[in-house]
Image (cartoon, rainbow, N blue to C red):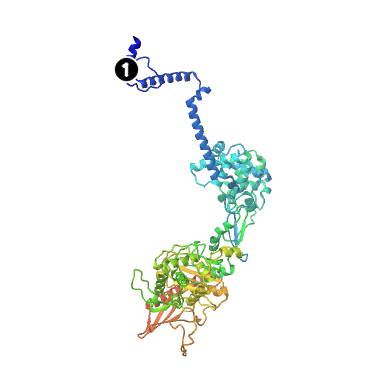
Amino acid sequence: MGVIDSMFRRRKREPEMSGHRGYYSLSDDWDDDDAWDDRLDAVDHAVLAEERKRQKWWQREHWFGRRKRWWVARIVAVLLALFIALVAWLAITAPLNKSLEPIAPPQITLLASDGTPIARNGAVVDEPVDIDTLPPHVVEAFLAIEDRRFYDHWGVDPRGIARAAFTGTGGGSTITQQLAKFTFLTPERTLTRKAREALIAFWLEAWLTKDEILERYLSNAYFGDNVYGLRAASLHYFYRKPENLLPNQAAMLAGLLQAPSAYAPTRHYERAEKRMELVVQSMVAAGFITEAEARNMRSPALDVRLKSDLPTGTYFADWALPEARQMSETGYSRQTLTTTLDARLQNIARRVTSNAPLGEAQVALVAMRPNGEVVAMIGGKDYEKSPFNRATQAKRQPGSTFKLFVYLAAMRDGWSPDDRIANTKIEQGGYRPENSGGRYSESLTLEQAFAQSSNVAAVRLFGEVGSEKVIETARDLGVTSPLAQGDPSMALGTSTMSLLELTSAYAAVAANAYPVEPRAFPAPDRGWFENMVDGPSSFSGSTSANMDRLLRAAIDSGTGSAARVSMPAFGKTGTTQDNRDAVFVGYAGDLVVGIWIGNDDNSPLQGVSGGGLPARIWRDFISQALGASAAPSGPASTTSPDPEGPVEPLDVPNLEDIPLGDGNSRIRIRDGEAVFSTEVDGIPIDIRLDDRGIGVDEETIEAARRRAEERRREEEERYEEIRDQLESGGRIESN
């Protein structure tokens, strides 16, 4: 009956059972499986809690349960990752070999090409010390005042910090921490820096022996007077090797480390003496010497023999020093390098610039060989007052000297100096430059336009050649300053660049080899194969000859006539808007020279143009440097007369612009008008003669008169000042 009943019941549709998790209810009342699971979990937790109560915290089972082992493994993995990251950071930020290098660049002495010392820059350093060769009293003096427990701690000494805080003797930082600080870190005073200092100290202690740490510390510590390291300091202050230092000498040197500049005995001997007494007391407290030995220790006498009268910097030396650092070997040895500077030419440059009537304006001069070797440099009127180098650092507009690139691009593009270009006023377009003095004509040859520095002709030629080719030419000649493509004002030199950069470009034209890299040290000799594979480029013979012709015309019969000398000379004048910059760059013989005059605040100059004072300074420098006389009696003809044309008596070639014998004056003939141009005290004056008679610009005459009056008054004041000085000194009798 039961079997039949069960078969009957299977045929009935029964409700679908919900999923379960391995537990089967023994009663129909337990239909909620989740509740049953929760109850079983509660029982498990209760059993585990009871077992944990029976375990003590020191028993292994208390800490190594299944879940706890998982968390312990995670924590260990995180700590291991942090340790690996910390080691990697220390290896990058604190490489051990860095503590073997001097912390300040070693001293470099720069010589002129003839061996004359010109500057000495850098720290006084010497070879590292060896602890094994130092007398015990030398090491003990430093340990007593700086880190008494050096051989007992692991880089950081809490006891030493506490002692320094309460007694005022000894440093709060250990020797290891100090080595970490001045070798790897900046001198900032922050908790972050102190934490990094402690980490690096532990790092150094882990990888170096105590003696190695002490050696590196003593070899790099600063002792004042620009002296780094114990060996250099002992030689500087006592002219003794550190292995031969006496106890009192070692004590004084050890006392300098807390404040080297304040305790330097060459300037503050009494302070150094008091600090030495504290070092001696510390040595007694540490048990290194007895009270009797301390009482008998007298202050040492200085023996300073290594003195330098050389300047630490000059305009040329400041520019050459970065290259010198790259050339010098790393390490503690001092370097002596020979530069390209010519002492004779540098003196000439200093003389001609100091004698020029500059007023309040500044001046810069760069002289180099055609291969780029700089032989003279003036970066301003007075390095002591202003070390800013206006020859290398100042970016100023070159004015019409930039026309070199426009005309060179045209010559490379097939133009000839005899080709003509319009010289009429530009009356269309957004950019309408004007010629200086408002002088125009129907047309000019390119030679005439370049010599007379016609602005409208240069802008038209710029448009004909295209800005791309002009910029390409400038880049070929080594110009790296930004040049705005498509800007017609660029033809007149509105893009800024340094005088050194501009002069190097003219050197490339002089050498017919580009680019020319300005150098402070002699260029290494290049083999024929190297020149063939990677040698400088050059212009075609005709292009080079045409550029020489244009540049010579600018001096012989153009705006640069004030620069004429009794030998072939080539150059170009440049004057920016409102006379803010006056420039002349040219070459003669084996010298390429650039001159700039201007005000640091970019204010206008008073009566100074590129063809005036800069050209005369250039002439004076070239005359003295090459032995050429200045201002020949007549201009050199750059063209030959046409043999087929009529030659009449009294014909004058280039009648439109005739330079006169003094080099500062000339006569121009334009459209039936004769203009006599000269300068009075640097102020240009034009006297015009035409059908209406003689005309003179009264404003320029008045400016010249005022300038002459000011100069006379200055000379009188100077005379009275000198007389007062002589009278006060008893060298002359007063009236």
Picture coordinates of residue 521, whole percent (x, y):
58, 63
Picture coordinates of residue 114, whole percent (x, y):
62, 66
Picture coordinates of residue 181, whole percent (x, y):
54, 45
Q: Which residue is found at the position 33% from the left and 21% from the top? A: 16
Instruction: Identify the secondary structure beneath mark 1.
Output: loop
Name, please, the residue furthest toward the left: 12
Name, please, the residue furthest toward the bottom: 649
The quadrant holding residue 178 is top right
Badge 1 crowding class, 10 Å Cα cut-off, few under 14, some 14 to 19, many 20 or more, is few
Name, please, the residue furthest toward the top: 1
Visible residue check, residue 541: yes
Q: Quadrant of the N terminus?
A: top left
| Mark 1: amino acid | Arg
Q: Is residue 6 left or right of residue 277?
A: left
- On the image, numbered disc 1 is attached to which residue? 11
Up/down of 726 relative to 239, above or below: below
Q: Is residue 385 left or right of residue 427?
A: right
Up/down of 204 relative to 268, above or below: above
Picture coordinates of residue 298, whole percent (x, y):
65, 47
Q: How many marks?
A: 1
Q: Is residue 295 left or right of residue 626?
A: right
Visible residue check, residue 380: no
